[in-house]
Structures are given as structure tokens and as C-alpha cells.
Image (cartoon, rainbow, N blue to C red):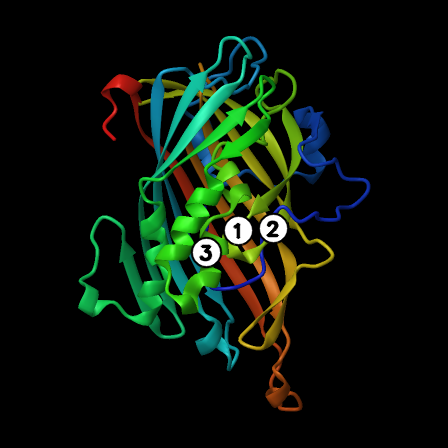
Amino acid sequence: MVLFIGCSKMETEDPIVADQTSPQEGQSTQMSAAESQPNAPAPSAEVLELKKSLTSPEQPQQLSLNWPDGKRFVYEIGIDQVTSAGNSPLAAAMDSKADQHFTYALTPHKDPDSGSTQLELEFLAAKLNMDMMGNKLNYDSENKKAAESIDPMYSMLSGLDAIMGQKLTMTLSPDGEIAAVEGIQEMYEKVINALPDAAKSVAQGIVQEDQFKQLIKYPFLPEAAVKTGETWNRTYTQVFGISGAMEIDNNYTYLGQTTQDEVQLNILSYDGKVVIGEDQSDQMMGVNLTMEGGKNTGIIRLDQISGHIVESDTSQEMTMTMSLPDNMKGMPIEAPKISIQMNQKIRLKEVSDVDSATE
């Protein structure tokens, strides 16, 4: 859940035009390790080290998600992002750093008659540290600033206060598709009412249905059982808060099994690319920004029994070009290329019975 970032435009439900030879969104193309090897990058040091602790199951594994009824899962997602214009004279205006942490809970309730599952999504806490254009901003929903110390930038984040403790209900069909989302409009109204007039446009970045859906979607799962070393391709749309959407095209590899903190896990690695659509450009500070694409790598640890994420690490690099503003055209200044480095970690903090879970 990326709410505020230093640059725009990156990864909404707006359609993205993909290469006609690519799989459609959510489509899976499975390949053997040998078939995928010619174009596969060398395994990272982290993957090589992880493989030392893995075992290979004798039978192919069906990786699927089956949320257990009566449990409450508390997750934390942390996002570190660095945006840089390198040695450009405009770097002081473009460079930024952001460290964001969000804590949320998922509580599934199964309907035995319909076979559907209702997932209650509750927002518990948020913490942000940002450094942009010389302005530093620190926000902690559990450690509020005194009213007299709040600056105009900080007041923009008061919308986050409005969603803490709020709940959405998402209904999953028996085949795992999101059939309905309840509570979005009520949440949006709370955020709008909490924000000062000058910052009300920020509400669309705080409350995005597609962004919240990402917290429960598992678009990377293969359609069939996989053996150790087997690779499959998945394409899907990734949402980046107020910044838009991009298509992700990843190759996933099943690495094997391990045990971590007494929990049995299935381990996946992946690498891929960020695919640019026809309209991946926007404006910031009066200049045009155009995305050029990027790449992804990561490791996913899944619970062997129910298939939910126990831990996930993602590294993403993207590049954009910036056209010079009108008042700088003709000057001996080259339009800068802007690099974006983002590291994201999702961690399952605790699992508890619904009756004993503390609200």
C-alpha cells in the first residue's frame, strides 16, 4: 500500500495496453526449468544462500490459497523508496527518500452455503518518514504530534488518521476472485472530512479500492502443481497509490520447502519487468515525466497448509525521463533521467483466534 511517493506516474484500474504476444492479466504460462533457462538471469546471492536450507518435495506441489476460518492475521508492510535525479542541476528539487510502514489485519469468515469467503480488512497503524525538496516529514499514527507543532505538510496526512481502525469487507468467490467490496464510500467520506480544504485531493491516494484489493490478491500462484525448479509466468496490474498503475510481467520459480519459526513454508523466487503502457506520463512541478520501465526481483514465503504469505521481499527499480520546464529550454542543461529504487517487505506479525484477538 504505497500512499505517498516522490514521483508520479507509476503503477489504478485504468487499462494498460500490453504486447499482444504477452499473456493476459492473471494468465499463467508454466515452463520447465530447462525451457526458461536461456533467458533467466543468474540467481541472486540471497537465493543461492536460501537454497542451502531448502528441501525438494517428492511430489509436485499445488500452491493455492485457502484462508482458514476463525483466524486473524496481522501483517506489516514496509516500503523504502529512494528517488534520484543523479548529478542533474534539478536533483535538489527531484530527489526524495521515503520510509513507510503500515499495519493491517485480515480476518476471514467462510460461508458454508455459498462457498465464498468474507475477508475483513482493518487498518491498525501507519508510520511515514519522508525527505523531499529539503522538507522532512515524520508521521506516526500511534504517536501523534502536538497540535501546535503540526506544519502544513503534516496536515495532509491527517487523512491517514481517519482510516485507522476502519474496516472494509471483501467477498471472495469460491474460485478466489474478489466479488464485492463494502465500506469504501464510508471510508472516503471520513478521509475527505478529516483533510483541510487545500489537501482534499490527497484523499484519492489514501482511499483506492484497487490498492486495498492488492493486500489480499495472490496473482502469482500457478494454475497447476509445480516441481522444484519449475518456472511459470504471470502478468498483472500493480497499483501505486496516487501515482497510477503499471503492468508487471514476472517469471516465478518454485525453489522448495523449509521451516521457519516452526512454520512449514513453500518458497518462491521471481524476476521480471515493469511494462509501460501507452499513457505512462504525468506532470509534477510543471514538467512532464515519462516512465521508461523497470525490473522486479523478490522472494515469497508461503504457509504450506493454507498458502497465505508469511513473508515477502521485493526489490523494484524504475526509470523515468523529465522534460525541462519552458523557462529552462534552450539552456545548456540536459533533461535528467530519474531513477526510483523501492524495497518492499511484507511480514506476518501474528496469527490469533478471532475470539482471543485484541481489537
**Cβ atoms at labels 1 and 2 below 8 Å apart:** yes
Residue type at tag 3: Ala
Looking at the image, which is closer to me, 18 or 334?
A: 18
Q: Which residue is mark 2?
A: 245
Q: Which quarter of the image is occupied by the C terminus? A: top left
Mark with earlier residue (3, 1): 3
* Coordinates of residue 237 in the picture (x, y in percent): 62, 43
Q: What residue is shown with label 1? A: 240
Q: Please tell me which of labels 1 and 2 falls first in the chain.
A: 1
Where residue 22 sits, quadrant-wise, is top right
Label 3 Cα crowd, 10 Å radius (few <14 / some 14-19 / many 20+): many
Of discs 3 and 2, which sits in the foreground? 3
Residue 311 visible, this angle: yes
Is 329 placed left or right of 254 in the picture? right
Q: Residues within 10 Å of mark 2 (few under 14, many from 20)?
A: many
Residue at (69% x, 24% y) in the render: 32
**Helix, strand or loop status at disc 1:** loop
> Residue 93 vs residue 123: left or right?
right
The label nearer to you, 3 versus 1, is 3
Residue 208 in the image: above or below residue 150: above
Distance (Cα) linking label 3 and label 2: 17 Å
The numbered mark at residue 203 is: 3
Locate residue 121: give its quadrant.
top left
Of the pair 91 and 146, the residue shown nearer to us: 146
> Which residue shows up at 40% across the image and 74% down it?
133
Task: Determine the secondary structure under disc 3.
Answer: helix
Query: Residue 96 placed where, x, y %?
Result: 42, 66
The CA span between labels 3 and 1 is 14 Å
The residues tagged by marks 1 and 2 sit, at their Cα atoms, a distance apart of: 6 Å
